[in-house]
Image (cartoon, grey):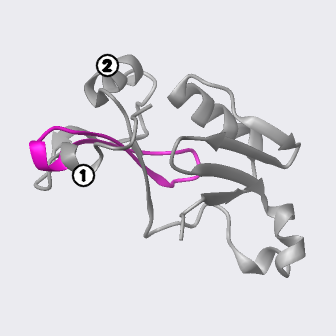
Amino acid sequence: MNFTSIRLITADVERLVNFYEHLFEQPLTRLAPVFAELRTAGATLAIGHTSTLAPFGGEQVATAAANHSAILEFRVADVDAHYHRLAAWLRGALVQAPTTMPWGNRSLLLRDPDGNLVDLFTPVTAAASDKFASQPAE
């Protein structure tokens, strides 16, 4: 089995797409006005408008901007460099400045415009680095 993608449902595709494009300094692929993707080496982050839920049974299937349990995690080569590049821009979105976690990742936690938690992290211990040795960062 391969984990392929996670999709965020939003009422404002442009706002969310602009956020992730700025965060990662790369354009998302816009497959339709109501749908965009950020493809990474490991999986895809998809952003879909609430109207994209129609084939699944309608907007009652998922509620935009209502996530209270999941964290989107992105491994980056240098989390501190990302933090310094984004510090001023992150005002109001910052949850936790880069902190070394007990499991060996240095982690920056923020919220996207819909309130979804986003973690940028860099493995900093040998054990954490070994876990990702076969996968490229960024």
Location of residue 74 in the rendering, given as x and y in whole percent from the top left corner? 42, 44
**Mark 2 Cα shell of 10 Å, populated few (<14), some (14-19), many (≥20):** few
Q: Residue at x 73, y 79 (%)?
A: 61
Residue 117: say if magenta: yes
In the image, which is nearer the foreground, mark 2 or mark 1? 1
- Give the numbered dot on residue 83: none
Could you tell me if the residues under marks 2 and 1 are in contact, i.e. CB atoms within 8 Å?
no
Tell which of 130 and 72 is nearer to you: 130
Tell which of 30 and 65 is nearer to you: 30
Location of residue 26 in the rendering, given as x and y in whole percent from the top left corner? 61, 24
Q: Amino acid at mark 1?
A: Lys
Q: Residue at x 88, y 43 (%)?
A: 33
Q: Which residue is mark 2?
A: 84
Q: Is residue 30 left or right of 92 when viewed as pictured?
A: right
Q: Residue at x 30, y 30 (%)?
A: 79
| C-alpha gap between disc 2 and disc 1 | 26 Å
Q: Is residue 61 above or below residue 119?
A: below
Q: Amino acid at mark 2?
A: His
Residue 82: say if magenta: no
Q: Residue at x 43, y 70 (%)?
A: 69
Q: Residue furthest top?
A: 85
Q: Is residue 124 left or right of 24 when viewed as pictured?
A: left
Location of residue 44 in the rendering, given as x and y in whole percent from the top left corner? 61, 49
Mark 1 residue element: helix
Q: Is residue 72 above or below residue 51?
A: above
Quarter that holds the C terminus: top left
Determine which quarter of the picture holds residue 53. bottom right
State the extent of the magenta-drawn residues as a range: 106-128
Q: Which residue is mark 1?
A: 131
Tell which of 15 and 120 is nearer to you: 120
Sequence order check, earlier mark of 2 and 1:
2
Determine which quarter of the picture holds residue 88. top left
